Image: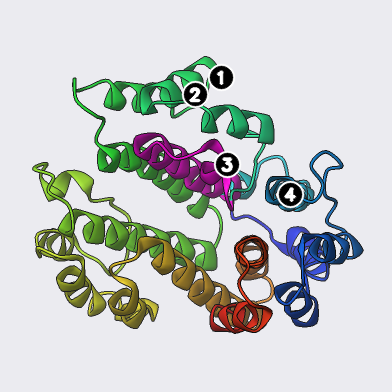
Amino acid sequence: MTARWEAPNARARGLGTHLLSDEAMSALSTAPDLAAMVALLEAAGIVIPEEGRLTPLAIELGIRRAAANELQRLARWFGDRSAAPGLIFADEDRRSLRAMIRGAAAGASAEARLVGLIPTPSLPERVLAELARQPRVTDVAALLVAWDHPLGSALLSAASATATEPDVLRLELEVDRWFTGRARAAASHGGRTLRRYVEQSIDLDNARTALLLAASDTELPADDFFLSGGRHLSRAAFRDAAKAGSALAASQQLAGPLAAHGVGGLLLQHAGDIARLDEALLRARMSALRLEARLDPLGAAPVLAYVLRLRAQVVALRRCLWGIELGIPPARRAAALEETA
């Protein structure tokens, strides 16, 4: 049975009015200090915990909690048989688990691993905080097993497969495979827009992986990392890009196949910086879905556009927060926000 989107779309449009306006975001980008930022956030309904109230960590926590609450409000408007909320939450879980894996492998601080993440019912705030404190990737995976997360066993097996440091790319592949399975199952009953969204997600995941493989010295076969279910990026094109020898060379090969998604130029521009690429792709997909929502208001686009707008708001608020904390002049902060709008 094809999912019906009328009720969640109506809720998404309502929740969209709670997102920060351009004027509010501009004021936040030029706030003189953290106290002024907290006042502006709370005026917009984003509550900051009293403990450590004027610290970046407390403000980050308030931003994460507010985003998680909005997602859960949206999820309640889907019917019990809909797979769409699971897809939305799984996408956030994927981002969180990637951050935990890379953070543990790099020895990053717990605070750094939590930056920009949105808690979900399966990875709530307290669980994310505990995962972020784990010193090794195997400890992250072991905790997921203990909490009966569906990815726990696969990650623990992959993390324990060698006596040396775990292969981060291999672990991220397990995360992406899990998400892809959930996404394809949801798309099979979600209508045309959701199917196209999932196909694009898979294509972009494959492109991201190809860039990482091209810049790495892994000896694992590129074919092992390819995810089936995309629309425009074939296995052969993925394999060629992954073997290109550099991220820039890989992006040049990927730009053609992914031109249909309108992101070829972004791959070329941000090939050497995956974090910047992820942000640029988020903005591009958000803009495309907002247009799609006007053209097809009864499909999945209004919900998907809202979810990406919420995620983009978290990214923008993080940028404002750390700009203030690092002492970047207000004019430069405002200019940087404008470039990423």
Marks 1 and 2: in contact by CB < 8 Å? yes
The tag on residue 55 is: 4
Residue type at numbered disc 3 = Glu
Name the residue beneath numbered marker 3.
111
Residue at 24% in and 36% down: 167
**Of the residues tagged 4 and 1, which is closer to the observer?**
4
Question: Residue 30, how many percent across, how many down?
Answer: 73, 77
Give percent across and percent down for residue 183: 47, 49
* Residue at (59% x, 55% y) in the render: 2
Q: Is 213 on the left-hand or right-hand side of 46?
A: left
Q: Which residue is mark 2?
A: 144
Give the class, few, some or many, for how many residues have Cα within 10 Å of label 1's Cα (few <14, many ≥20). Answer: few
Q: Which residue is the site of mark 1?
A: 147
Q: Quadrant of residue 332?
A: bottom right
**Of circles 3 and 4, which is in front?**
4
Q: CA distance from mark 2 to mark 1?
A: 5 Å
Which segment did they paint magenta?
88-116
Q: Residues within 10 Å of mark 2 (few under 14, many from 20)?
A: many
In the rendered image, the vertical position of residue 195 relative to residue 71, given as above or below: below
